[in-house]
Amino acid sequence: MRAFPKNRNVEKSEVFHLPQTGRFPYLSSLPRYQQAMESSVENRTSFFHLHLISDSTGETLISAGRAASVQFHASQPIEHVYPLIRNRKQLLPVLEAIDHSPGIVLYTIVDRELADFIDERCREMGVPCVNVLEPVMNVFQTYLGTASRRRVGAQHVMNADYFARIEALNFTMDHDDGQMQDDYNDADVVIIGISRTSKTPTSIYLANRGIKTANIPIIAGVALPASLIEATKPLIVGLVATTDRISQVRENRILGATIGFDRGGYTDRATISEELKYARSLCARHNWPIIDVTRRSIEETAAAIVALRPKLR
């Protein structure tokens, strides 16, 4: 039995030396993704293969794998994602790929027989594997006193919550960047902020959770829509960041060749500082909460907004 392979230093050319699809025909139809190395990485670096096997989309595994691997800065994961694996025929070439590039195996397979087969083959290959959902399901089963249904892709069923998310996404796209200003009272959340404070991506992230979100740019000297000021239903929240952060993001923005565009004024720190001062004064005047997004990811900003909703009801 082969021992678990340790991290090792390898040439960059080795990192992408994976099985040829001609050897494993099924692999050519799998949307396997490999995490690209940053261009700043040296020619020799420590890496490990991370194999993610799912009978559904693989989103749960990708999130779990990345949440764990980010804690180990000395090693870079090379991700291999195998979604929609629901029978042995589909699984066999995946196991061959794992044997060719040993590493950590994480899987979410609800079919007990298929899960046991993965465990058995991984033991034979000498690679560690974890059924990510099984410990959680065992806790639920013990507490609730009933067995799980073991239904593949149950979290993606097209139920009322699913259609609520679709409705929220449609609403958010229609109300991006100050569009369709007449019905802000139909929103759950309205985000305001000066340019480059991540209003749109935060809105889309919230919409994907079923929260109808509009966003409006704050422009010095331009009044906010009366429909927003009069709205009583939505949580209205302002996003700000440091002057340096916004200037940096604006500098990196790919700008179109719009006639009359003032690039200097757009990235000037003094101008940005005045924009932020104006945005803060608007929020203070209307008693709207402010979130500083300087060091927050989109996910963290969205979580902060979600946390504010019950507090302001």
Image: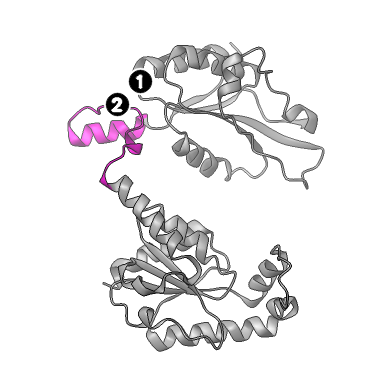
**Do the CB atoms of the residues marked 1 and 2 lie less than 8 Å apart?**
yes
Return the mark for residue 150.
2
In the rendered structure, find residue 111 and report the number of the disc placed on it.
1
- Which quarter of the image is occupied by the N terminus? top right
Name the quadrant of the C terminus: bottom left
Instruction: Report the residue at 45% width, 12% height from top.
Output: 88
Which span is picked out in magenta?
Answer: 134-160
Q: Residues within 10 Å of mark 1 (few under 14, many from 20)?
A: some
Residue 60 image-quadrant placement: top left
What colour scheme governs how the chains and residues are painted in the rendered image of this protein?
one colour
Dividing the picture into quadrants, the one containing residue 283 is bottom left
**228 above or below 97?**
below
Residue 188 horizontal/vertical position (percent)? 33, 65
| Residue 238 place in picture, x, y as percent | 46, 75
Residue 11 in sight: no
User: Amino acid under label 1?
Assistant: Asp
From mark 1 to mark 2, how far is it between C-alphas? 7 Å
User: Foreground: 179 or 253?
Assistant: 179
Q: Which mark is residue 306?
A: none
Q: For label 2, count other residues whose C-alpha is less than 10 Å away and answer few (under 14), some (14-19) or many (20+).
A: few
Please say if 259 is above or below 149.
below
On the picture, is 225 further left or further right than 78? left
Q: Vertical placement of 123 versus 222: above or below?
A: above
Q: Residue furthest front?
A: 259
Q: Nearer the viewer, residue 107 or 280?
A: 280
Amino acid type, residue under disc 2 in the picture: Arg
Is residue 161 highlighted in magenta?
no
Sooner in the amino-acid sequence: mark 1 or mark 2:
1
Q: Residue 271 in the image: state x and y as whole percent.
A: 66, 84
